[in-house]
């Protein structure tokens, strides 16, 4: 109207208007922190970030298996099939996957990415995001917890430091490089801690359901990580359960809702595990597990050594101290000097505050558990105090891990050094208090601490030298097989049907490319690699005459080419060759790929009826049957 003006809308400070909606300041802070962590994760493992564009993955059997896992979960979602059993490994027998590192929840969530860009893209993308997500999970736990004096951390600096020291540590980024399930599973630990803390603060059905969902989701990510997440949540809830104040009925109701929510969310995994157990395919040979009980412990020197990451900055002597001070292992166990110093500072300044001593106990207890069944003084000297015999191995009754593996259901927790992840949770939260104190009392010193901390962040050994990688596709070698839509079985040689826990007679350690190409061409494979291989699966595979002879010949010591290209009778007679051919045809085997030259096996394939088809990418490909057209190779 004339003479009137409309005053501009005033909005509270700290809000952002987006299409009529205001984003509160706390949300903006969380988004900024998350973005910062994701960027930091990409920087410390910068090599892995480039893999998204190079279409490669680390050259390891585990990396290849994760690619296959994402492919199999996509297949299961699209066809509404049971993901916990697959006929695409150890074909035509198939493998149970209830106790395999299947990553069912990440696999389902990443199905759109897998469908559009392929399973390798899902694997690389989650590997890039995992460190930042772990950082953010710890940041939330630090902000949610009342660590000291009944208050949360006084400022953002300590919480941000807790996230960085946890998620960007060598311990977790090393897992991220080689064992994606461990990296994603470690992020579940601070999430479980936050859920438990919030349940203590506001008991009720809602918080109980959240805790149950978190623990159920952890089980669908990684089974051993779910055990550790439950341990962290249980330790956080223990003082609340015995303390007076909250009515006992309210506590039981909250825990009841948590149990129901856990059972609902984790029901696919629980049902599959129960079914595999009832079928007798859950137990593992005691001798195989006993070997892990002895060899999986970490030494105190390793756990409190500087991170081997410092070698990337020229500090080779400090890097080698880590490797020489304890046994070799499949995971990094170093807390790092900077984290240790900050955690001890936080412990000293907060000793009288509620919450500090429980965190110190968490750190110390996890460190004691990670020692395993003995005390490794160096790479060659092992001390077993007051030794007793358990499953034909000498173990120490004064070490807690000895009794942990005797708890029903925990006997398969065969990697004691993984328990350092629990200690990392306690140490990171103690270190956060130390960082916050430095911010208030000695800010200049914090700059030097930050520089030193950066030197201990990231994956050990992944520096300027490019790691060994393998491509996600071999179109020349695998293209003709992918073009064959008959779903015939592909036999890869060297051949193995193997598990994470060794089983006698499991065959050769086949090339990692086998499972990557299995995900690319979609054919069932004889080769198999799963975390827990039931011996019954291997026995059923070898019950087929063709496979039985193939395993035997593969191990034949002569490995020489026979005269005239024929096997002598004393190796495989004519009747046996005819039976083997019928066996191969009956299983609908169509292809055989020689990844390495094994003359004895090549001769056997020709005698059975395979003929050479083409050579590409360092492989020789054979087809079974007569009169088949030669596959075009460009």
Image: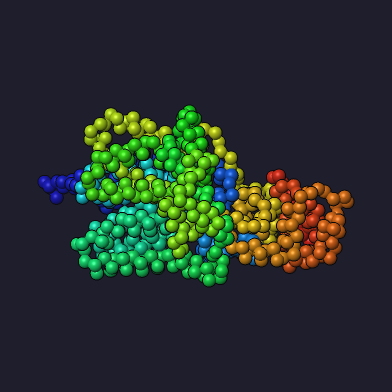
Residue 268's spot in the image, x, y percent?
Answer: 46, 67
* Residue that extends furthest to the left in the rendered view of this protein: 3
Residue 78 seen in this snapshot: no
Residue at position x 27%, y 62% in the image:
241
Residue at position x 23%, y 35% in the image:
440
Front residue of 436/507: it is 507
Residue at position x 56%, y 69% in the image:
280
Q: Quadrant of residue 486?
A: bottom right
Residue 438's spot in the image, x, y percent?
Answer: 26, 35
Horizontal side of 498 relative to 387 (left or right) equals right
Horizontal side of 232 relative to 566 (left or right) equals left
How does the figure colour the protein chain or chains? Answer: rainbow
Residue 522's spot in the image, x, y percent?
Answer: 62, 58
The answer to whether residue 342 is above or below residue 487 is above
Residue 511's spot in the image, x, y percent?
Answer: 65, 49
Residue 399 seen in this snapshot: yes
Residue at position x 43%, y 35% in the image:
306
């Amino acid at each position: 109207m004339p003479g009137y003006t409309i005053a501009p809308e005033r909005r509270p400070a700290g809000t952002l208007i987006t299409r009529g909606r205001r984003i509160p300041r706390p949300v903006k802070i969380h988004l900024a922190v998350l973005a910062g962590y994701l960027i930091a994760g990409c920087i410390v493992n910068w090599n892995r970030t480039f893999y998204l564009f190079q279409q490669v993955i680390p050259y390891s059997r585990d990396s290849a298996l994760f690619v296959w896992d994402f492919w199999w979960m996509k297949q299961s979602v699209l066809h509404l099939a049971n993901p916990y059993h697959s006929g695409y490994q150890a074909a035509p027998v198939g493998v149970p996957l209830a106790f395999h590192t299947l990553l069912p929840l990440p696999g389902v969530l990443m199905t759109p990415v897998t469908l559009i860009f392929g399973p390798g893209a899902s694997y690389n993308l989650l590997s890039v995001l995992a460190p930042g997500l772990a950082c953010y999970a710890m940041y939330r736990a630090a902000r949610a917890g009342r660590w000291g004096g009944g208050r949360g951390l006084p400022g953002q600096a300590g919480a941000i430091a807790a996230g960085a020291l946890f998620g960007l540590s060598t311990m977790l980024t090393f897992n991220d490089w080689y064992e994606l399930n461990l990296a994603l599973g470690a992020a579940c630990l601070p999430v479980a801690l936050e859920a438990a803390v919030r349940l203590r603060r506001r008991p009720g059905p809602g918080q109980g359901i959240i805790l149950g969902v978190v623990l159920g989701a952890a089980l669908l990510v990684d089974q051993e990580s779910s055990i550790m997440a439950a341990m962290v949540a249980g330790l956080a809830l223990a003082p609340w359960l015995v303390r007076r104040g909250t009515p006992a009925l309210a506590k039981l109701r909250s825990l009841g809702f948590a149990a129901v929510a856990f059972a609902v969310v984790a029901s696919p995994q629980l049902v599959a595990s129960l079914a595999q157990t009832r079928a007798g395919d859950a137990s593992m040979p005691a001798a195989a597990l006993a070997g892990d009980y002895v060899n999986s412990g970490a030494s105190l020197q390793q756990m409190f050594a500087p991170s081997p990451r410092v070698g990337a900055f020229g500090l080779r002597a400090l890097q080698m101290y880590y490797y020489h001070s304890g046994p070799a292992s499949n995971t990094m166990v170093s807390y790092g000097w900077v984290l240790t110093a900050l955690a001890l500072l936080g412990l000293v300044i907060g000793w009288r505050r509620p919450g500090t001593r429980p965190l110190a106990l968490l750190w110390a207890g996890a460190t004691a558990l990670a020692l395993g069944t003995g005390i490794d003084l160096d790479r060659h000297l092992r001390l077993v105090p007051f030794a007793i015999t358990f499953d034909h191995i000498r173990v120490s009754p004064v070490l807690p891990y000895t009794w942990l593996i005797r708890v029903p259901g925990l006997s398969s927790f065969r990697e004691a050094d993984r328990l350092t992840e629990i200690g990392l949770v306690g140490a990171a939260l103690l270190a956060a208090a130390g960082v916050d104190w430095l911010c208030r009392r000695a800010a200049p010193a914090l700059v030097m601490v930050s520089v030193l901390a950066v030197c201990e962040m990231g994956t050990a050994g992944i520096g300027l030298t490019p790691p060994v990688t393998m491509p996600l596709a071999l179109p020349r070698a695998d293209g003709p097989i992918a073009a064959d839509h008959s779903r015939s079985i592909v036999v890869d040689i060297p051949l193995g049907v193997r598990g994470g826990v060794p089983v006698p007679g499991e065959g050769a350690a086949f090339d990692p490319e086998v499972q990557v190409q299995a995900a690319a061409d979609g054919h069932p494979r004889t080769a198999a690699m799963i975390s827990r291989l039931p011996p019954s699966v291997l026995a059923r595979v070898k019950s087929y005459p063709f496979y039985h002879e193939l395993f035997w010949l593969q191990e034949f010591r002569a490995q020489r080419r026979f005269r005239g290209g024929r096997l002598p009778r004393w190796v495989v007679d004519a009747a046996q060759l005819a039976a083997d051919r019928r066996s191969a045809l009956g299983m609908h085997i169509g292809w055989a790929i020689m990844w390495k030259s094994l003359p004895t096996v090549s001769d056997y394939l020709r005698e059975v009826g395979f003929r050479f088809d083409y050579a590409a990418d360092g492989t020789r490909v054979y087809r079974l049957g007569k009169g088949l057209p030669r596959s075009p190779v460009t």
